[in-house]
Image (spheres, rainbow, N blue to C red):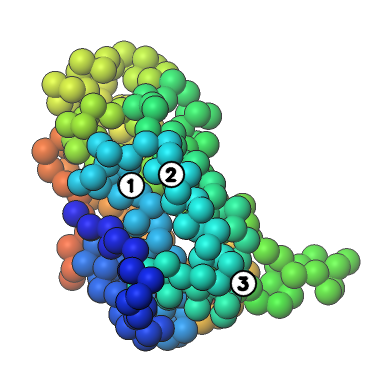
Amino acid sequence: MLQLPKPTPATSPLASVDEAYEICRQVTAQYAKTFYLGTLLMPPAKRRAIWAIYLWCRRTDELVDGPQASQTTPETLDQWEQHLESIFAGHPLDDADVALVDTLERFPMDIQPFRDMIAGQRMDLYRSRYQTFEELSLYCYRVAGTVGLMSSAVLGVETGAGRPPWQPDAVYIPQEEAIALGIANQLTNILRDVGEDIQRGRVYLPLEDLDRFGYSEQDLFNGVNDERWRALMQFQIQRARQYFEDAERGIRALNRDSRWPVWTALMLYQGILDVIEANHYNVFNQRAYVPTPKKLLYLPVAWLRAQVL
């Protein structure tokens, strides 16, 4: 697990900008291999910015899912939000902050998605079940849809892309599609990580969906893989794929140098759903991942889509 670095003492010099970005790169490469592959297709300035965003998101997630999570309280998250405000004010408190401060100078962003992500971690502090998909979708927006909004500022949009003929000067900002991609990724994570989550006593599948297919929480904790489970998983996978499809419409509005990496990242994550199906929906003790040779096969297809779609 990622260990959160402690704030550097005031008497110690912080890392240089290049050193800070290297920290971000190393963490991204170690903990998000599929995501990292997609970032390598970006121009250097954009990929470094995405690494900086990833590390902040990772650190935020580790507050409730990391090795020290048992010590995290609402006050811990209050302090982390104050830390965030310091970053947005241009005052880094530790080495990792240096990269994000530089990213914010190069690619101005709204602080609200960052605040919303912290709100998502607050949800993990007090609840481990979601009765409806409406409840779950709010959680997914906060912990993942926000990443789409953060990244949009870096990816950029093509002037005039998607504009209607009666609004020739309009610039289309694919915010809803960015959120949809984040939610699609999180729904995929939830399906992939069912086995890990139940070991921690967490159930992210909406309880109303379990009821719909006559599948109980006890079945889930027992790892029952029968026709009810397969039907439930098919339903969940179709939902995730719909979010991926909704996200695709926004890619054409992005800057040309961002389309290939985004298509690649989307297809790689969609591929996890294919693997879950190939594994006969066994997510209890078999982790779904896309093998490296298959990842490489996605690259030319993603490039072609970036050119023509």
Q: Position of residue 62 (x, y in %)?
A: 30, 50
Residue 144's spot in the image, x, y percent?
A: 45, 50
Q: Are marks 1 and 2 in contact (CB under 8 Å)?
A: yes
Residue 301, image quadrant: bottom left
Q: Is residue 304 visible?
A: no
Q: Amino acid at mark 3?
A: Pro
- Distance of label 1 from label 3 (alpha carbons): 26 Å
The Cα–Cα distance between marks 1 and 2, rounded to whole angstroms, is: 8 Å
Q: Which residue is mark 1?
A: 63
Q: In this figure, which residue is indicated by the disc labeled 3? A: 108
SS class of the residue under badge 2?
A: helix
**Name of the residue lying farthest toward the right:** 166
Of tags 3 and 2, which is closer to the observer?
2
Callout 1 touching callout 3 (CB < 8 Å) = no
**Which residue: 49% across, 51% down?**
81
How packed is label 1: few (under 14 Cα within 10 Å), some, or many (20 or more)?
Answer: many
Quadrant in the picture for the C terminus:
bottom right
Query: Mark 2: which amino acid?
Result: Leu
Amino acid type assigned to the residue bearing label 1 in the image: Leu
Going from N to C along the chain, the mark reached first, 1 or 2, is 1
Front residue of 53/167: it is 53
Residue 17 at x, y percent in the picture: 41, 83
